[in-house]
Amino acid sequence: MISRAVLRCRRQKIEKLLFDSTGLAEFRPAGMSEQYNLAERIASDAKSLVKIAHVASQEWIRSGKFGVMVAKNRGLDVKNFRSEPEALKWLLTTAEKPSGMRSATSIESSGLSRIEA
């Protein structure tokens, strides 16, 4: 699910993605090898062009630190959050964007894509 969303964002030049997994009962934190593989795949899919805020359960945030580190080491701008307002605040902060990507200033803006379970 997240890989498809990242690919869609990249193809449509949407630079920011809010992913909310709190409503997915089956979305459990992965083991170390699964985190590594998932982080590598998402970072590769994003090609450093999509900034991702993930709203997740406390359990996911605690156990997902390794995956975030792997993704960041591969150039992905990603962070886990406990609440949507906190995630949006971080997501909407301006950073230098790659050329050709659209900017986002609010959740309604065309530069932000949001997926939720």
Image: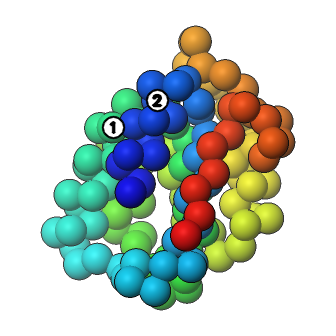
Instruction: Tell whether label 2 touches label 1 (CB within 8 Å).
Output: yes
Asked whether residue 78 is in view, the answer is yes
Within the image, what quadrant is residue 56 found in?
bottom right
In three-dimensional space, the C-alpha distance between marks 1 and 2, rounded to whole angstroms, equals 8 Å
**Going by the picture, which residue comes out furthest to the top?**
100
Asked whether residue 76 is in view, the answer is no
SS of the residue under disc 1: helix
Between 3 and 59, the residue placed more toward the observer is: 3
**Which corner quadrant holds the N terminus?**
bottom left
Task: Look at 34% across and 63% down and name the residue there.
Answer: 67
Q: Is residue 60 left or right of residue 73?
A: right
Q: Which residue is mark 1?
A: 45
Between 16 and 110, the residue placed more toward the observer is: 110
**Which corner quadrant holds the C terminus?**
bottom right
**Three-letter code, disc 1:** Asp
User: Where 17 falls versus 44 (above or below)?
Assistant: below
Task: Look at 38% across and 46% down and name the residue there.
Answer: 4
Between 90 and 110, the residue placed more toward the observer is: 110
User: Where 111 falls versus 100 (above or below)?
Assistant: below
Q: Which residue is mark 2?
A: 10
User: Where 25 falls versus 100 (above or below)?
Assistant: below
SS of the residue under disc 2: helix
